[in-house]
């Protein structure tokens, strides 16, 4: 293999090497180039160099976005990087190959655009001063020089189709057809520089920390919808980070690869199934024609709360997955899609089913029921607001589609011409009407979302107060006493 590579008459990028990254042997760290300005690509792209030695997230799957995250700094080290002389990192660099449109301006799910819009709008909002959100410092599609020309790093370039597309668009796909901008297999190489740096959701040390973090995430979510018209669509444990400051854990919602800009006129992807199992909403899983709204993300958050509270919210005190496999909640990510839909519909149908299938299996911290009381009340409040809301008609409570008999009005249904005379046709019998509970819910999503945000704010204030009391009592050893 080495012989073949060394004898190849081509540039290194065509052999798989990334020319925008370089390992600095004398400093024992990596140097990586990232687009400096928003959307900066192509010839003469303005880049900024960062340095890293730590990979926070590895790309270990054969398929997918191959997302990697590096903790980096823009200050070049002056001495060899080591455990005794580490880099002082200030940003996270997200490196991914996301599904994209060939024309970047047509890409409604572009994470760089979403983050730039969030930064511009929330920075001027007084209501957003008390939330933590990812702040973009640079990013865009990656470009590099090949044969003296700037080319975008994407799958067309990788497979040798980039130049062919420009020279002979009639044959670029080998079938005598032009390659479509909507190619479902087209991926573009993106890099995004963001701050602040956070930790995994699994790093929470108490119920109070966990409640603060998840409520913070949904407060962020509401700000994105209300002020930026951006719907996230992928609430999961991987997309919520813990940001610690002065002993207080706060939450931050990240990853906008699945997000859509609701201000875009063309939103064909809005009803596409997105998300992460086992947190995907019922409406989303069932591929319903009911429009996705922020309520789907709130339902995903409810699923996350239930999943983590069943597993255990405190680091080092969680159930083993073997034990989880014996509980009803396991069906949220096992079997066929219909099996998962039925499991969630059954669990969320009413207060009693939610209590019997889900809440009764919440893991108790320290064996005392009152330690989980805050989290249980939060889960029950969100469930009631989503599935038993008084703002909805009784027929739209629950999760199952209902059928009811409706007496039709005596009205003209059709007219048929017969012997130059018109005969009125009526139906006098009763007919069956289907009631989809998610349809009316989607129509009233703004009202219900405000109610859910009010719950999140109330529980956030309570959890923040508990964290502060724990800090005043000098550390983790006193956290348990607060719940007793």
Image (cartoon, rainbow, N blue to C red):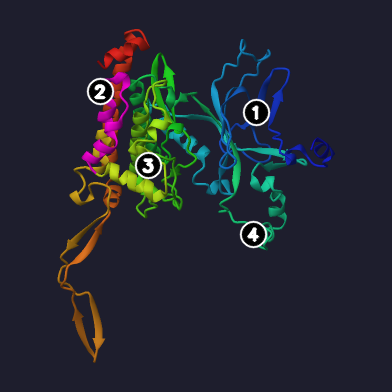
N-terminal-most mark, 1 or 4:
1
Q: CA distance from mark 1 to mark 4?
A: 34 Å
N-terminal-most mark, 2 or 1:
1
Crowding at label 3, few (<14), some or many (≥20) Cα neighbours within 10 Å?
A: some
Question: Where does label 4 land, which residue?
Answer: 178
Quarter of the image where one finds residue 320: top left
Q: Are marks 2 and 3 in contact (CB under 8 Å)?
A: no
Q: CA distance from mark 2 to mark 4?
A: 63 Å
Question: Where does label 2 land, which residue?
Answer: 369
Which of the two discs, 2 and 4, sits closer to the camera? 2
Q: CA distance from mark 1 to mark 3?
A: 43 Å
- The residue at the point 68 percent across, 45 percent down is 158
Q: Is residue 271 magenta?
A: no
Crowding at label 4, few (<14), some or many (≥20) Cα neighbours within 10 Å?
A: some
Above or below — where is 70 with respect to 267? above
Question: Where does label 1 land, which residue?
Answer: 32
First to last magenta residue range: 350-379
Above or below — where is 474 with respect to 483? above
Which of the two discs, 4 and 3, sits closer to the camera? 3
């Amino acid at each position: 293999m080495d012989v073949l590579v060394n004898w190849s008459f081509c540039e290194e990028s065509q052999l798989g090497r990334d020319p925008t990254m370089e390992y600095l042997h004398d400093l024992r760290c990596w140097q990586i180039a990232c687009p400096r300005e928003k959307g900066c690509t192509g010839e003469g792209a303005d880049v900024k160099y960062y340095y890293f030695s730590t990979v926070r997230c590895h790309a270990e799957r054969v398929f997918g976005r191959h997302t990697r995250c590096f903790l980096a700094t823009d200050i070049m080290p002056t001495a060899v990087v080591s455990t005794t002389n580490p880099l002082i990192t200030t940003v996270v660099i997200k490196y991914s190959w996301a599904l994209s449109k060939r024309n970047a301006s047509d890409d409604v799910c572009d994470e760089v655009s979403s983050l730039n819009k969030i930064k511009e709008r929330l920075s001027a909002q007084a209501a957003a001063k008390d939330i933590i959100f990812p702040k973009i410092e640079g990013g865009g599609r990656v470009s590099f020089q090949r044969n003296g020309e700037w080319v975008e790093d994407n799958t067309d370039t990788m497979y040798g189709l980039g130049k062919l597309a420009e020279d002979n668009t009639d044959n670029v796909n080998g079938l005598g057809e032009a390659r479509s901008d909507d190619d479902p297999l087209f991926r573009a190489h993106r890099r995004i520089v963001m701050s602040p740096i956070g930790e995994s959701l699994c790093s929470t040390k108490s119920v109070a920390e966990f409640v603060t973090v998840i409520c913070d995430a949904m407060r962020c979510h509401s700000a994105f919808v209300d002020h930026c018209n951006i719907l996230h669509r992928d609430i999961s444990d991987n997309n919520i980070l813990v940001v610690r400051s002065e002993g207080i854990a706060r939450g931050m919602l990240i990853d906008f690869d699945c997000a859509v800009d609701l201000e875009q006129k063309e939103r064909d992807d809005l009803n596409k199934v997105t998300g992460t199992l086992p947190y995907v909403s019922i409406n989303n899983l069932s591929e319903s024609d009911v429009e996705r709204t922020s309520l789907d993300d709130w339902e995903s958050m409810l699923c996350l709360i239930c999943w983590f509270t069943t597993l255990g919210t405190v680091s080092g005190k969680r159930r083993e997955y073997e034990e989880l496999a014996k509980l009803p909640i396991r069906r949220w990510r096992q079997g066929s899609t219909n099996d998962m839909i039925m499991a969630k519909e059954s669990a969320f149908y009413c207060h009693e089913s939610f209590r019997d299938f889900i809440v009764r299996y919440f893991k108790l911290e320290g064996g005392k029921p009152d330690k989980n009381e805050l989290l249980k009340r939060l889960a029950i409040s969100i469930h009631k607001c989503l599935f038993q809301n008084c703002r909805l008609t009784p027929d739209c409570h629950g999760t199952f589609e209902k059928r009811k008999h409706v007496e039709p009005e005596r009205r003209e249904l059709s007219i048929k011409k017969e012997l130059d005379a018109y005969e009125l046709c009526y139906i006098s019998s009763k007919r069956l009407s289907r009631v989809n509970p998610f349809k009316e819910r989607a129509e009233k999503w703004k009202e219900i979302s405000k109610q859910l945000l009010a719950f999140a704010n109330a529980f956030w204030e309570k959890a923040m107060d508990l964290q502060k009391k724990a800090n005043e009592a000098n550390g983790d050893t006193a956290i348990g006493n607060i719940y007793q």
